[in-house]
Image (cartoon, helix red, strand yellow):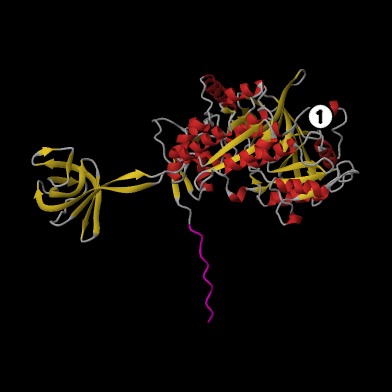
């Protein structure tokens, strides 16, 4: 008789009861993790939140599930007479409502791809070749004048959604607003021109967003193309191509001749498949505004990307301070459509005002839309934006609250020769608990793009012998980003080192204060006893913690509740004197017991 193999069952996720609204810091305590862990999970799901920001149950449930818990909604005390009608009209606050889906309801969705690169490396031409339409023609100077979104079909029939942005500034601006739009980024590098400063900047922005990237090596048909030189430059940026033993996908393409495009799409799908992208098409739509403007004839026109659920003509949506009923929808080919599912871009009409790019939208109850918009407007006017300034000084104390473990820096310098030694020196300040990351370093003044990257990454901008541009300075003040200017490298290193020290998880060691011998027991009540003691070493202080030992074994640890000399309460008793001691939670003293008082001291 053969014995059936025993398969170990996966441990059941422990339940956790979450109220209908909870502060991020309190949620971290509930889930027994640091606040930064919760904030990272929120960012993965497209929600930018601070430690003091309130999230609703649905959002908190997503985080709890991702961290291995089974969320349960705690019963809230509703006033008498509160009925279902009130519950049905309740909507999310300005933070995005995210509903945890039943895995059985999820279906694969197309990946959303952003194409980034240097201004003349063929980004728009590549998109044009992929979707087989002309975009470059008619644009002033060949520069993209709008944000568009399009879908292409790979050889295997699967769709890929492409977002065409004017550059990494728009990419990062959306992320700074909390919009996790992109699943895969394509970095376009011209084989005849190589990695340019804008290319490096785009790569840094994509890395900071935590988005996987595929390199499209364009213009391989150019006379002076040098693919090997470009791959060497990529290796200098820690992007090691697969043919050199790394894991970076580099696909040779020619946008003009439409060569290598099938291979590019295939690799984008391979990278996206690793993320197992899924969404529930059967729920109300949630998504992001890609662009919006006012048309003289049609009113507010917005291009939106549905991320989960299905958007239907006639739905009422809210996006920031804008709301309205969807009067009409048009797909990327200009066709009128009635519905749009996950990862589908559409142009819609019907919003009350122009929402900013990167603003989240969701389908909402028609009656609640106006009320919710007014609530958001009042919160904005009151300055309750939820964003807190991040400064080096504030970072000193953040680690003591368990909020931050990465110190993200955007570094700008006057000459290239200062960049490499500064980056190396700063990143060498990293320790096990704190990771110093220079997420972007380049030559030149501090630009708006640098500020946007700092906002999105909760980082600080450091300028060495450079100053911020006027627009960057205004944006920094508006977004609460600190820009530190230095003329001496040592001062930069010293300030960052102080931040790292402030961010270190404190290490405490026990320091013994007194060694006490129990010589007599006095009963003062049925459940209380006083130990008549002799202080052999050190000084015992009232309110210290004490440990009772007997025969080398620890019996109890607790606070000293009473310290007496004869009948008088005293603050301390020194070595060589007698005293009476009561310890909280313990009354089973015996003659010969040893009491050790101690305190915990931070050693780092």
Q: Is residue 394 magenta?
A: no
Residue drawn at the location 71% of the way across and 39% of the way down: 200
* Viewer-side residue, 387 vs 215: 215
Q: Is residue 9 magenta?
A: yes
Report the quarter where the C terminus lies.
Answer: top left
Locate residue 526 relative to residue 155 in the image: left or right.
Answer: left
**Residue at mark 1:** 143
Locate residue 314 relative to residue 372 in the image: left or right.
Answer: right
The vertical placement of 501 against 474, above or below, is below
Count numbered badges in the picture: 1
Q: Using the rendered image of the protein, determine whether residue 587 is visible from the camera's viewpoint.
A: yes
Q: Residue furthest top?
A: 296
Is most of the magenta stretch helix, strand or loop?
Answer: loop
Image location of residue 365, percent across then percent down:
58, 30
Locate residue 19 relative to residue 159 in the image: left or right.
Answer: left
Locate residue 344 relative to residue 67 in the image: left or right.
Answer: right
* Viewer-side residue, 395 vs 141: 395
Q: Quadrant of residue 338?
A: top right
User: Within 10 Å of the Cα at label 1, are there few (<14), some (14-19), or many (20+) other Cα atoms?
Assistant: some
Q: Using the rendered image of the protein, determine whether residue 54 is visible from the camera's viewpoint.
A: no
Q: Quadrant of residue 422?
A: top right
Q: Quadrant of residue 569?
A: top left
Q: Residue furthest bottom?
A: 1
Image location of residue 175, percent across then percent down:
63, 35
* Residues drawn in magenta: 1-11
The vertical placement of 296 against 165, above or below, is above
Identify the secondary structure beneath mark 1.
Answer: loop
The vertical placement of 111 against 147, above or below, is below
Image location of residue 415, percent across then percent down:
69, 33
Residue drawn at the location 74% of the way across and 48% of the way down: 268
Image location of residue 197, percent across then percent down:
74, 36
């Amino acid at each position: 008789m053969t014995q059936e193999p025993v398969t170990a069952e996966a441990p059941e996720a422990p339940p956790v009861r979450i109220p209908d609204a909870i502060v991020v810091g309190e949620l971290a305590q509930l889930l027994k993790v640091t606040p930064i862990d919760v904030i990272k999970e929120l960012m993965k799901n497209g929600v930018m939140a601070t430690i003091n920001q309130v999230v609703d149950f649905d959002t908190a449930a997503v985080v709890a599930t991702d961290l291995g818990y089974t969320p349960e909604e705690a019963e809230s005390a509703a006033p008498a007479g509160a009925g279902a009608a009130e519950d049905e009209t309740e909507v999310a606050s300005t933070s995005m409502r995210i509903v945890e889906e039943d895995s059985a309801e999820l279906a694969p969705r197309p990946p959303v791809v952003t194409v980034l690169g240097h201004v003349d490396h063929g980004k728009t031409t590549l998109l044009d070749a992929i979707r087989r339409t002309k975009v470059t023609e008619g644009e002033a100077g060949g520069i993209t004048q709008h944000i568009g979104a399009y879908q292409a079909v790979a050889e295997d029939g699967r769709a890929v959604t492409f977002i065409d942005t004017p550059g990494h500034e728009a990419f990062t601006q959306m992320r700074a607003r909390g919009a996790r739009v992109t699943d895969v980024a394509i970095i376009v590098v011209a084989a005849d021109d190589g990695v340019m400063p804008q290319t490096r900047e785009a790569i840094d922005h994509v890395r900071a967003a935590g988005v996987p990237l595929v390199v499209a090596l364009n213009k391989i048909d150019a006379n002076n193309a040098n693919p090997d030189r470009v791959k060497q430059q990529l290796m200098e940026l820690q992007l090691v191509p697969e043919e050199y033993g790394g894991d970076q996908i580099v696909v040779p393409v020619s946008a003009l001749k439409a060569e290598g495009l099938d291979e590019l799409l295939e690799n984008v799908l391979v990278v996206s498949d690793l993320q197992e992208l899924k969404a529930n098409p059967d729920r109300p739509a949630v998504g992001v505004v890609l662009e919006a403007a006012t048309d003289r004839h049609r009113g507010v026109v917005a291009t939106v990307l549905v991320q989960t659920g299905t958007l239907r003509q006639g739905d009422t949506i809210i996006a920031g301070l804008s709301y309205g009923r969807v009067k009409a929808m048009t797909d990327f080919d200009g066709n009128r459509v009635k519905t749009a599912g996950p990862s589908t871009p559409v142009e819609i009409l019907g919003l009350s005002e122009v929402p900013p790019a990167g603003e989240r939208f969701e389908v909402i109850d028609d009656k609640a839309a106006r009320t919710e918009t007014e609530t958001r407007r009042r919160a904005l006017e009151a300055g309750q934006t939820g964003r807190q300034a991040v400064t080096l000084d504030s970072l000193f104390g953040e680690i003591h609250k368990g909020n931050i473990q990465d110190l993200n820096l955007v570094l700008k310098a006057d000459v290239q020769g200062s960049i490499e030694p500064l980056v190396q020196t700063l990143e060498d300040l990293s320790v096990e608990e704190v990771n110093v990351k220079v997420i972007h370093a380049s030559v030149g003044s501090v630009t708006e793009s640098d500020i946007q990257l700092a906002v999105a990454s909760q980082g600080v901008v450091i300028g060495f012998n450079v100053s911020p541009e006027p627009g960057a300075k205004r944006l920094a003040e508006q977004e609460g980003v600190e820009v530190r200017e230095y003329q001496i490298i040592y001062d930069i290193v010293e300030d960052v080192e102080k931040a790292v020290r402030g961010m270190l998880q404190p290490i405490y060691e026990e320091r013994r204060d007194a060694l006490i011998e129990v010589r007599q027991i006095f009963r003062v009540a049925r459940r209380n006893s006083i130990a008549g003691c002799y202080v052999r070493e050190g000084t015992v202080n009232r309110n210290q913690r004490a440990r009772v030992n007997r025969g080398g074994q620890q019996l109890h640890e607790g606070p000293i509740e009473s310290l007496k000399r004869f009948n008088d309460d005293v603050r301390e008793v020194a070595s060589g004197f007698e005293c009476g001691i009561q310890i909280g939670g313990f009354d089973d003293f015996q003659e010969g017991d040893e009491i050790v008082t101690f305190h915990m001291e931070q050693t780092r």
